[in-house]
C-alpha cells in the first residue's frame, strides 16, 4: 500500500483558554490534563453523572489554549455542556473548527513522506510536533499513522501534501481505526454507552489516577468491582455484504451490536461490535444475519463471525 493522504474533515475542534483552563478541564474530563504538553496529546472523554459517555476527544496543547478534537456534530453539544460549569472558572471555550483542516497520513512510507515536509515528526504514540499553524500527531498503531491539524491559512503545507501524489481512501483509515479498537462517539450514540462497553477503561481514555470527573464513582466501580459482561470486540465476516438490518446472533438470539465496520483488502468485512464476554470466551458460534437483494428478490443471508485480536489487555 502506497502512502495515503485521507481527508478527515469530519471533525469539530474546541479551544479552551484562560488562567484556569487546565484546572477546569482536569475536573471535567476523564484524562489527566497534566500529561498534555506541546509534544504530547492524550485521549479522553466526557461522561454524564451516570457514567455514560457524552463525547470522546483528543486533547492537545496549542499556544495558550487546549484543543479538544472530537467528531463532527459533537462540538456544539460538548461546548453547551461545558459552558454550564466554565462560568465558575477563569476560562473560556469557543469552537475553532472552521479555522483548521484535518488530514490522515499512513502507509509504509508515511514517516519518510512527512519528514520531507515537516521539521520534526513525532516518534512515540500520541506524540505531537507542530507550530501555531499546524499540529502533527502520531497515532498508536503498529504501522506509522498520523493525523495533521492544519491552519486553513497554511497553503504551503497543504500544497506540499497534495504534491506527494498520494491517494484518498477513507475506508482504509476507518479499517485502521477498527484494527486499533478505536471508537468515536457521534450525535447518534452520545449518552448511550459506558466506557467499559467501548474498552475506554482499558485503552487509556479513562485515567483512574487523575482524580474526580463527572460519573467517576460509577465508572471506577464498574472497572474495579464489576467484571465486564459485555465489551468491544473486533471480528471479521466472509462471504456476505453487511446491511442496515444486520444482526449478530447466537442460535436464535440477538446478542451483539455492530459499532463500526469497513471492507478489508481481501474484500471481507472487519467490524467492531459489543458482544457478551462469556460467549466470546466460551467460543460460542456467532453468526451475522441480514436480508440481501438477489436479482430483485430479497433473501436471508448469514455468515460465521470470526473474532480477531485487538491491541489491548485482556478484559
Image (cartoon, rainbow, N blue to C red):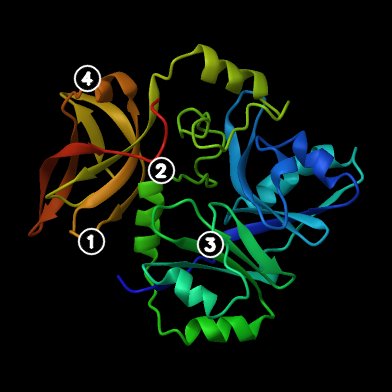
- Residue 28, percent across and down? 74, 35
How many callouts does the rendering have?
4
- For label 4, the crowd category at 10 Å Cα-Cα, with few meaning under 14, some 14 to 19 and many 20 or more, is few
- For label 1, the crowd category at 10 Å Cα-Cα, with few meaning under 14, some 14 to 19 and many 20 or more, is few
- Alpha carbon distance from label 4 to label 1: 29 Å
- Whether residue 177 is visible to the viewer of this picture, yes or no, is yes
The residue wearing badge 4 is 282
Q: Nearer the viewer, mark 3 or mark 1?
A: 1
Residue at the image point whose x is 50% and y is 40% from the top: 189
Residue at the image point whose x is 69% and y is 38% from the top: 32
Quick one: label 4 or label 1, which is nearer the N terminus? 1
- For label 3, the crowd category at 10 Å Cα-Cα, with few meaning under 14, some 14 to 19 and many 20 or more, is few
- Whether residue 6 is visible to the viewer of this picture, yes or no, is no
- Alpha carbon distance from label 2 to label 3: 19 Å
- Alpha carbon distance from label 2 to label 4: 21 Å
> Circle 1 sits in a helix, a strand or a loop, which is it?
loop
The residue wearing badge 2 is 181
- Alpha carbon distance from label 2 to label 1: 18 Å
Quick one: label 4 or label 3, which is nearer the N terminus? 3
> Circle 4 sits in a helix, a strand or a loop, which is it?
loop
Quick one: label 2 or label 3, which is nearer the N terminus? 3
Is 106 placed left or right of 121 in the picture?
left
Considering depth in this image, is 231 or 31 the residue closer to the camera?
Answer: 31
- Alpha carbon distance from label 4 to label 3: 38 Å
The residue wearing badge 1 is 265
The residue wearing badge 3 is 10
Amino acid at each position: 500500500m502506497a502512502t495515503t493522504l485521507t481527508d478527515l474533515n469530519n471533525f469539530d475542534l474546541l479551544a479552551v483558554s484562560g488562567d484556569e483552563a487546565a484546572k477546569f478541564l482536569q475536573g471535567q474530563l476523564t484524562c489527566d490534563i497534566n500529561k498534555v504538553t506541546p509534544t504530547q496529546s492524550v485521549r479522553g472523554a466526557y461522561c454524564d453523572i451516570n457514567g455514560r459517555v457524552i463525547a470522546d476527544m483528543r486533547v492537545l496543547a496549542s499556544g495558550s489554549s487546549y484543543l479538544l478534537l472530537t467528531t463532527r456534530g459533537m462540538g456544539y453539544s460538548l461546548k453547551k455542556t461545558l459552558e454550564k460549569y466554565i462560568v465558575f472558572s477563569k476560562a473560556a471555550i469557543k469552537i475553532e473548527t472552521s479555522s483548521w483542516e484535518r488530514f490522515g497520513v499512513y502507509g509504509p512510507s508515511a514517516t519518510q513522506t512527512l519528514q520531507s515536509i515537516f521539521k520534526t515528526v513525532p516518534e512515540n504514540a500520541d506524540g505531537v510536533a507542530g507550530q501555531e499553524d499546524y499540529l502533527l500527531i502520531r497515532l498508536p498503531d503498529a504501522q506509522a499513522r498520523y493525523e495533521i491539524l492544519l491552519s486553513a491559512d497554511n497553503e504551503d503545507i497543504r500544497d506540499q501534501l497534495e504534491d506527494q501524489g498520494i491517494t484518498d481512501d477513507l475506508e482504509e483509515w476507518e479499517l485502521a481505526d477498527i484494527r486499533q479498537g478505536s471508537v468515536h462517539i457521534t450525535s447518534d450514540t452520545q449518552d448511550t454507552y459506558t466506557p467499559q462497553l467501548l474498552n475506554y477503561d482499558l485503552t487509556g481514555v479513562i485515567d483512574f489516577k487523575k482524580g474526580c470527573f463527572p460519573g467517576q464513582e460509577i465508572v471506577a466501580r464498574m472497572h474495579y468491582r464489576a467484571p465486564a459482561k459485555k465489551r468491544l470486540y473486533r471480528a471479521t465476516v466472509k462471504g456476505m455484504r453487511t446491511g442496515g438490518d444486520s444482526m449478530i446472533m447466537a442460535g436464535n438470539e440477538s446478542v451483539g451490536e455492530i459499532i463500526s465496520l469497513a471492507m478489508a483488502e481481501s474484500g471481507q468485512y472487519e467490524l467492531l461490535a459489543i458482544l457478551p464476554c462469556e460467549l466470546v470466551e466460551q467460543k460460542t458460534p456467532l453468526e451475522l444475519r441480514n436480508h440481501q437483494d438477489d436479482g430483485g428478490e430479497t433473501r436471508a443471508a448469514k455468515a460465521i463471525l470470526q473474532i480477531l485480536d485487538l491491541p489491548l489487555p485482556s478484559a
